[in-house]
Amino acid sequence: MRTRKGYLYTLEVLLAASMIFAAIIFTFRYAPIKPQTEMSIIKQQGFDALKYIDEKGDLRKYVSLDDETGIENDLSDILIKSIKFEIDICDNVCDQRNVPTNQPIIIVDYYISGYDSDYGYNKVRLYMWKKY
């Protein structure tokens, strides 16, 4: 009788070890997904560039004159060269004509209130994508 008790304990240990091993395999079966930090860094750089132009005092002037080229010229000096971008100054609906549709686009919205005697608001939309 005593020998059967030993077999039962051995079977119990093997069963517990196989359950632990199965739990480990089930838990670590898939590799963790790499977060897309690159896109969030590019978005933050775009927002910071628009904020810099605004704090410099030029962005409100460009928006009041509807001068998208002036903003793009300033941004080309600030943003890294591997990023292509397009600016649109709009009220509610923005134009996406010059934005590619076959790759991921990062969009930054920056709202500007009036300039001088104009008390309206406009949205500066910055479209950014990687240059390949």
Image: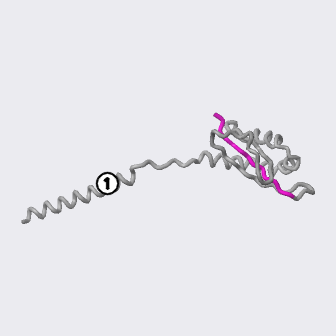
Give the quadrant of residue 131: top right
Give the quadrant of residue 20: bottom left
Q: Residue at x 65, y 39 (%)?
A: 130
Mark 1 = which residue?
A: 22
Number of callouts in the render? Answer: 1
Where's residue 9, x and y in %? 17, 62
Q: Residue at x 70, y 36 (%)?
A: 81
Give the quadrant of residue 95: top right
The chosen color scheme is one colour
Considering the image in quadrants, where does the N terminus appear?
Answer: bottom left
Indicate the amino acid at tag 1: Ala
SS state under label 1 = helix
Q: Residue at x 88, y 47 (%)?
A: 65
Q: Residues within 10 Å of mark 1 (few under 14, many from 20)?
A: few
Seen in the picture, residue 121 relative to 66 is either above or below; the reply is below
In the rendered view, does 3 fall on the left or right side of 34?
Answer: left
In the rendered view, does 103 fall on the left or right side of 54?
Answer: left
Q: Is residue 130 magenta?
A: yes
Residue numbers of the magenta segment: 120-132
The single residue placed furthest to the top in the displayed view is: 132
In the rendered view, does 33 fall on the left or right side of 27?
Answer: right
Where's residue 124, x and y in %? 78, 50
Where's residue 52, x and y in %? 77, 49
Q: Residue at x 26, y 59 (%)?
A: 16
Main secondary-structure element of the magenta-colored stretch: strand
